[in-house]
């Protein structure tokens, strides 16, 4: 049948599972990816898009680490947009609209071309445990597969239950059965579980929509891409999305069915995503609003299927249909399928170490929605980290941990482990205290060297990053030391309706003005010539501009990060006895014993822990 002994077994082929399997295999682990349906590998269960606010930064970070999400997104994109361009660079976030079918096929093709990676289609129902360590998995057919590490990435499938109005049935996704047995197995091992819920909107026939009544949303005129590699190219043609709105009539129709909406009427007791609420929740929560935005998103190049983003619901299908027909442009709408809610099991992530290995069972890792997160990007980020650390663990190497000042991935995992989550966790730029350092444009500089040291990023990638850094420093040096002419500067300032200068100064001083951009400076002949002869592309100039304009913010965040690293370097032994410290507060003892922080910095970030508690720890550790 197949070899039943592996280094790493990954359970589930969603975004977390795919990245985990690819990372482990590419690092040299003999890996098996087990899933209930290989045809749905890397399925986009919800909207057909990757990236967005903070999520786009995560995709860039995954790519810099050597993951596949960025490459797959580029190769299957139908539209590219850089969001938040009107705000500061810390907020700029890339997003692509994807071809849903192509996305899954491209992922499967890349995985099948990954050496050391095998596949098996079956349901895993139990773990094989010896001496508080996982040594394999067992399937519903009784097949036992042995491995040195196991990664669980079960998504919404653990005891998944789908709701449409009063109707409900088992399922992990529309048309797919739920995964049964594994929750009970984990609970028998002492793990605590919970229930969460999420929803998805209807899919409709694009031929039945009147786009002339909607607002067109085209992609960027000069689209970029996610991956830093040379294997992908920016889009040369794009498909537009559209915006329309609900109205008072739509809201009144929907209210008729509120008592029949399980996500709204309390029939589903589990917690839903606060930041991606159902249309029922939006109408109820924002009673003063007469309309809500609806984003009309095509599902691909060669399909008429459309995703109705912003209309997530668990209302009865006839209410959904009646209400949508009252939305402008949807008067003749035809359904492909109604929206639905799904509730599923998750395991509070405070039961994990920062490596995503469980504290209770050695060599067992959790990644993705099993940890209480929502979103493809958050899942994929955990997947690649779990894949890396599963490989490192069975090779007796130090875990790979990203700090909060190194990556959004570091923020994500640190939040999950130290704070836990009682609602589906979604990443936002506001969650990162070092977001000026964690920009989408510099993920390659932050992480490629670390990935190369692991053995994931290629030497070619590393050289490319090093060359980029060298060129940017050269450009900043030129701008900081070379003076502009009064005539050239005043031509620009007059166009901007700004006061003219009376004496020359450095280019960096001119560029640091809020109203002056690199595009203005490119009109100066001498600078234009330097850029051409030095082969400085716009990406390098953009980064130089960011560093010059935001140098104060960047330097301040770097200083704060350095202070934190002093505490990050002080390790706490895993068997440290907090109960012996009489001066430690009761709450601190309780939290430390439960969460088992690995460094003093982690201990300081736990809710309810005071500076005095950290001082007690410092003294007790001889500091």
Image (spheres, grey):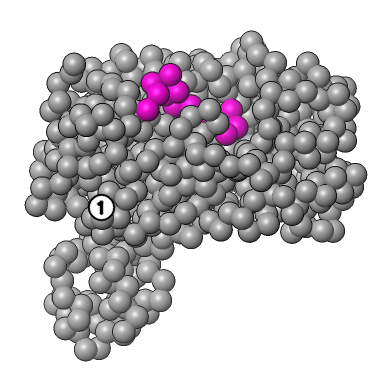
Task: Provide the secondary structure element on which disc 1 rests.
Answer: loop
Decide whether residue 457 is among the magenta residues.
Answer: no
Residue situated in front as seen by the camera: 475 or 546: 546
Q: Residue furthest bottom?
A: 582
User: Is 171 located above or below residue 589 in the figure?
Assistant: above
Name the image quarter holding the N terminus. top left
- How many numbered marks does the figure carry? 1
Give the residue pinned by disc 1: 358
Name the image quarter holding the C terminus. bottom left
- Residue at x 21% of width, y 37% of height: 137
Q: Residues within 10 Å of mark 1 (few under 14, many from 20)?
A: some
Give the image location of residue 120, x and y in percent. Answer: 28, 22
Residue situated in front as seen by the camera: 590 or 262: 262
Q: Name the image quarter holding residue 342.
A: top right
Q: Is residue 567 visible?
A: no
Decide whether residue 48 is among the magenta residues.
Answer: yes
Residue situated in front as seen by the camera: 402 or 119: 119
Give the image location of residue 86, x and y in percent. Answer: 69, 42
- Residue at x 44% of width, y 26% of height: 42
Q: Name the image quarter holding residue 300.
A: top right
Compared across the picture, whether 563 is left or right of 133 comes to: right
- Residue at x 41% of width, y 71% of height: 607
Give the image location of residue 358, x and y in percent. Answer: 25, 52
- Residue at x 18% of width, y 31% of height: 145
Give the image location of residue 198, x and y in percent. Answer: 57, 46
Compared across the picture, whether 342 is left or right of 619 comes to: right
User: Is 90 located above or below residue 601 in the figure?
Assistant: above
Q: What residue span does the magenta drawing correspond to?
A: 36-50
Q: Is residue 192 visible?
A: yes
């Amino acid at each position: 049948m197949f070899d039943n002994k592996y280094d790493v077994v990954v359970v589930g082929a969603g975004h977390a599972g795919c990245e985990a399997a690819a990372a482990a295999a590419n690092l040299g682990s003999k890996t098996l990816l087990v899933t209930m349906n290989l045809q749905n590998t890397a399925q986009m269960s919800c909207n057909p898009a990757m990236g967005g606010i903070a999520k786009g930064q995560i995709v860039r970070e995954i790519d810099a680490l050597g993951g596949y999400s960025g490459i797959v997104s580029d190769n299957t994109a139908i539209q590219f947009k850089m969001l938040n361009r009107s705000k500061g660079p810390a907020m700029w976030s890339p997003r692509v609209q994807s071809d849903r079918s192509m996305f899954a096929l491209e992922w499967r093709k890349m995985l099948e071309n990954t050496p050391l990676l095998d596949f098996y289609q079956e349901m895993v129902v139990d773990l094989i445990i010896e001496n508080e360590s996982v040594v394999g998995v067992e399937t519903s057919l009784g097949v036992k597969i042995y491995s040195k590490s196991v990664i669980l990435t079960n998504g919404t499938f653990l005891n998944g239950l789908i709701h449409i109005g009063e109707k409900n049935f088992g399922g992990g996704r529309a048309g797919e059965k739920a995964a049964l047995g594994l929750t009970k197995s984990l609970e028998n091992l002492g793990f605590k579980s919970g229930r969460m819920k999420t929803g998805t909107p209807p899919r409709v026939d694009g031929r039945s929509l009147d786009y002339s009544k909607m607002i067109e949303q085209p992609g960027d005129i000069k689209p970029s891409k996610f991956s830093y590699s040379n294997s992908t190219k920016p889009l040369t043609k794009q498909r537009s999305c559209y915006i329309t709105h609900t109205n008072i009539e739509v809201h009144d129709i929907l209210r008729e069915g509120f008592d029949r909406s399980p996500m709204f009427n309390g029939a589903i007791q589990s917690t839903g995503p606060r930041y991606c609420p159902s249309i029922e929740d939006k109408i109820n929560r924002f009673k003063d609003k007469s309309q809500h935005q609806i984003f009309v998103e095509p599902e691909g190049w060669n399909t008429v299927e459309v995703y109705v983003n912003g209309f997530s619901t668990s209302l009865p299908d006839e209410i959904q249909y009646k209400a949508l027909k009252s939305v402008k442009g949807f008067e003749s709408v035809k359904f492909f399928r109604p929206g639905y809610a799904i509730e599923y099991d998750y395991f509070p992530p405070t039961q994990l170490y920062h490596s995503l290995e469980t504290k209770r069972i050695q060599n067992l890792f959790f990644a993705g929605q099993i940890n209480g997160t929502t979103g493809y990007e958050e899942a994929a980020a955990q997947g690649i980290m779990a894949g890396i650390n599963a490989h490192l663990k069975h090779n007796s190497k130090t875990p790979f941990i990203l700090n909060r000042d190194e990556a959004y991935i570091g923020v994500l995992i640190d939040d999950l482990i130290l704070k836990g989550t009682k609602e589906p966790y979604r990443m936002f730029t506001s969650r990162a205290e070092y977001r000026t350092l964690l920009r989408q444009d510099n993920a390659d500089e932050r992480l490629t060297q670390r990935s190369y040291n692991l053995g994931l990023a290629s030497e070619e990638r590393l050289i490319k990053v090093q060359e980029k850094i060298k060129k940017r420093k050269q450009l900043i040096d030129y701008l900081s030391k070379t003076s502009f002419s009064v005539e050239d500067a005043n031509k620009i300032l007059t166009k901007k309706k700004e006061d003219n200068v009376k004496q020359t100064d450095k280019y960096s001083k001119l560029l640091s003005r809020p109203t002056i951009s690199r595009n203005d400076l490119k009109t100066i002949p001498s600078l234009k010539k330097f850029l051409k002869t030095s082969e400085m592309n716009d990406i390098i100039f953009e980064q130089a501009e960011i560093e010059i304009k935001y140098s104060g913010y960047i330097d301040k965040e770097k200083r704060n990060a350095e202070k934190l690293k002093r505490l990050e370097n002080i390790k706490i032994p895993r068997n440290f006895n907090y109960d012996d410290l009489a001066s430690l507060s009761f709450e601190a003892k309780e939290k430390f014993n439960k969460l088992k922080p690995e460094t003093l910095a982690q201990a300081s970030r736990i809710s309810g822990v005071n500076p005095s508690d950290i001082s007690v720890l410092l003294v007790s550790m001889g500091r």
